[in-house]
Image (cartoon, helix red, strand yellow):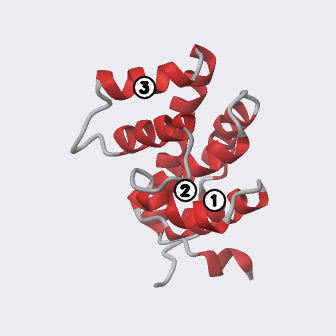
Amino acid sequence: MTERMELGKFAGEAYKAMAGLDRFVAQSTLPKPLLELVRLRASQINGCVYCVDMHSSDAKQAGESDARLHAVAVWREAPFFTPQERAALAFTEAATRLSTDDVTDEVWAQAAAQFDEQQMAALTVAVATINAWNRMGVATRMTPESYKS
């Protein structure tokens, strides 16, 4: 697959704005490994190869095991995830698949039971931000190779 364009070259200010959202989330009390699982799951759903590569590597650097990383796509069936991680992943899936699903009251309540209001705000921003990054990556066909060379 050939990358269509280097979006950051032509949309530098947009990239800076997105990086600001990422900084907000990084300063939250949400655990870094959890954030990487959320980013990885949204990226899997959206089919963003660049982001799947990046966030699986980032999760590994944050201490995630191979078994857990391989199981993110099937987290509901896997025994490796805590109730907090399950709530975050369910919220991520619901907020990512808005065209076919919704963030139901049940999904919201499960997440809200695991996170305080500040964390829920940060989780919401994290999911929205990774979805925006995914859409840019998919639209421009970003590939890991083009950024590792």
Query: Measured along the vertical axis of the image, is residue 54 above or below residue 133?
Result: below
Query: Measured along the vertical axis of the image, is residue 8 above or below residue 124?
Result: below
Q: Nearer the viewer, residue 40 or 3?
A: 40
Please name the amino acid that badge 2 sits on. Answer: Leu
99 lies left or right of 26: left
Which residue lies at the image location 51% right of the left edge and 30% below the top edge? 124
Callout 3: helix, strand or loop? helix
Q: Which residue is mark 2?
A: 40
Distance between the Cα atoms at labels 3 and 2? 20 Å
Distance between the Cα atoms at labels 1 and 2? 5 Å
- Comes first in the chain, label 3 or label 2: 2
Q: Which residue is mark 3?
A: 110
Please name the amino acid that badge 1 sits on. Answer: His
Label disc, if present, on residue 55 of the rendered structure: 1
Q: Nearer the viewer, residue 69 or 40?
A: 69
Please name the amino acid that badge 3 sits on. Answer: Gln
Distance between the Cα atoms at labels 1 and 3? 24 Å
9 lies left or right of 129: right
Circle 1/circle 2 CB separation < 8 Å: yes
11 lies left or right of 23: left
Which of the image's four quarters has the C terminus? bottom right
Q: Quadrant of residue 60?
A: bottom right
Which is closer to the viewer, label 3 or label 2? 3
Q: Where is residue 118 drawn, in percent x and y? A: 62, 17
Q: Quadrant of residue 138?
A: bottom left
Query: Measured along the vertical axis of the image, is residue 74 above or below residue 132?
Result: below
Q: Where is residue 120 drawn, in percent x and y? A: 55, 23
Which residue lies at the image location 56% right of the left edge and 75% below the top edge? 143
Q: Where is residue 84 drawn, in percent x and y? A: 55, 34
Residue 142 visible? The answer is yes
